[in-house]
Amino acid sequence: MFERIATAIKDFFTPERIQAALIALVVLVAGFLLLKILAAFVKRFGRKRLTQQSSMLIRKAIFYIGGIIILVTVLQTLGLKLTALLGAAGIVGIAIGFASQTSVSNLISGLFLISEKPFAVGDVINAGDTTGIILSIDLLSVKIRTFDNRYIRIPNEKLLNSELTNITRFPIRRLDIRLGVAYKEDVKRVRQVLLDVADKNPFCLDEPEPILIFTDFGSSALEFLFGVWFAKTDYISLKNSIMEEIKERFDREGIEIPFPHTTIYSGSATAPMPVRLVQSKAQRPAR
Amino acid sequence: MYDFSASTTAQPDTLYKADIGPLSIWLRYTHREWQVASETGGDERRSRPLTAVRGKRAAAAREWARWPTETADMSVRLGPVLPDRPTLVKPDSSLSMLAGSSALFFVGVPVNVRVLVGPKETPLCDIPTVTLSNTWFGDPVSGELSYALKTRALRELSDAEPRPNVATCPLAVKNSSSSMLHFDRFNLHVEHLEIFLGQSRLWTNRVAVTFRGEDQMSQVNISRAPREIETITAKLAEPRSPAERSFVKKSFGVLKNLAGY
């Protein structure tokens, strides 16, 4: 039996077949090497000329298309008839198509996202409960790194169908601070102090000028909206510094930030609350 | 006026100090490294060259920046350099220029001080003599991050008192459009300018800006040193990023009100 197996193997591996296999191996190795070189060239060439996203897409396209060409070439070199294979692939494709509707939807959504460009690699986005930096925009999904270093994969279809906030799309942003001061405070002085705090903070932009809007006579305080502009990279530095500076300055100037409270008046803010002592029957002296 | 061309040979383990306007710089070569510390907030008119100072108190409680280097040549020079970003300039009061009119302004730009060491004058660091605040020139969607100048663009040179740390830029503005130019701010690209030594003050190149209408970019021409205003004795600094002598830029800001929130 072993002799028969050995003979069969010997008959199968004819010199022509061995030669074809070697050629196929060379094509495979050289082909993938060439693809790697091409991808590296695109990465280097595109560093200054292309966005990170475009460079990534072009490299992936080179790999996928180049990989298919190499595979077809190898199969042809080995003498396999592709027509039958393609026919079978067509039937399998239909079956896979029905089974992978979601994937196809994600793929098409990915193409729409690429053409619409609501965000780019490196942007910080907020999608639902997820906030993070875009690592890559792929055909089926987008990969995000959160600020606490988690890796999140969001299907493209979900991103296309829901509201998405690109936090770093524009070069500057405004930090809105809602605060309240006690009713006894002088509004003009509060305004002066807040604008001075913004002027002295190195992360606040002089222009656009900070805005200060007296928004409401709240139940516990006079309410203000204080908006200061900053370069998008300075968010954390500004947020930490200005909140502390406002508190410190208010403390120094004696400006009160009241906590929620309710004051009961008898009708006038200045008149004392009237109190009437009532004696019970038991406490009344006997007549 | 501070002599930016003077070089000093530092002795090892000796502390040196210089005052250039409001900026004080301490410098020493010790433990095979250069160390530099600085402080701003002093008198704007000070001008004291790099001189050895004594006493441990002078060196104490300073935040030193350090550069390890083995060198036998301890020559050091403090050179001026203009800020690394455009600076937003405003006239001393808002003005309007008629179509076809032109005007000359003088803008005082606080320089940075660059510490240059060794025979090849290797730059160690740039230290601003005045901490300029950040501002944005443009709209919230696009624009340039710039510095805001506290000093104003003046019409008379005599109104601009010479300061050792300030380079004066002659800015010639011409309105060649058919409409009025409301000149309330201008973004001066100082990173393209050189610094020259005049008889009484530091100078930059003369900048000529031609306003061609709100819908068009302004034509900006950078001339050589302003020899027609004052005798220039030396060039002290090259531009940070040389630009073409003539380029178009959106330089004038139209005052826009940001509506609502």
Image (cartoon, rainbow, N blue to C red):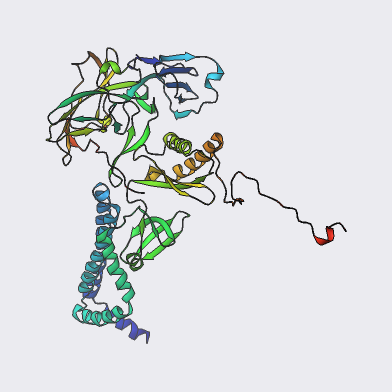
- Residue farthest front in this picture: A287
Image-quadrant location for residue B21:
top left
Residue B38 visible in the current orientation: yes
Residue at the image point whose x is 21% and y is 31% from the top = B96
Residue at the image point whose x is 28% and y is 53% from the top = A40
Quadrant containing the N terminus of chain A is bottom left
In terms of depth relative to the viewer, which is nearer, B147 or B9?
Answer: B147
Quadrant containing the C terminus of chain A is bottom right
Image-quadrant location for residue B27:
top left
In the rendered picture of this protein, how many numbered marks are placed on residues?
0
In terms of depth relative to the viewer, which is nearer, B7 or A117?
Answer: A117
Q: Is residue A61 above or below residue B213?
A: below
Q: In this view, does B22 lie to the left or right of A115?
A: right
Q: Where is residue B48 in the image (x, y as percent from the top left)?
A: 41, 14
Q: Is residue B41 above or below residue A36?
A: above
In terms of depth relative to the viewer, which is nearer, A180 or A228?
Answer: A180
Residue at the image point whose x is 29% and y is 17% from the top = B159
- Residue farthest right in this picture: A286
Residue B205 visible in the current orientation: no
Q: Where is residue A280 in the image (x, y as percent from the top left)?
A: 80, 60
Image-quadrant location for residue B20:
top left
Q: Is residue A191 above or below residue A143?
A: above
Q: Position of residue A22 (x, y in %)?
A: 25, 68
Q: Is residue B77 left or right of residue A179?
A: left
Residue at the image point whose x is 35% and y is 17% from the top = B164
Q: Position of residue B177 (x, y in %)?
A: 12, 35
In terms of depth relative to the viewer, which is nearer, A21 or A119?
Answer: A119
- Residue farthest bottom in this picture: A1
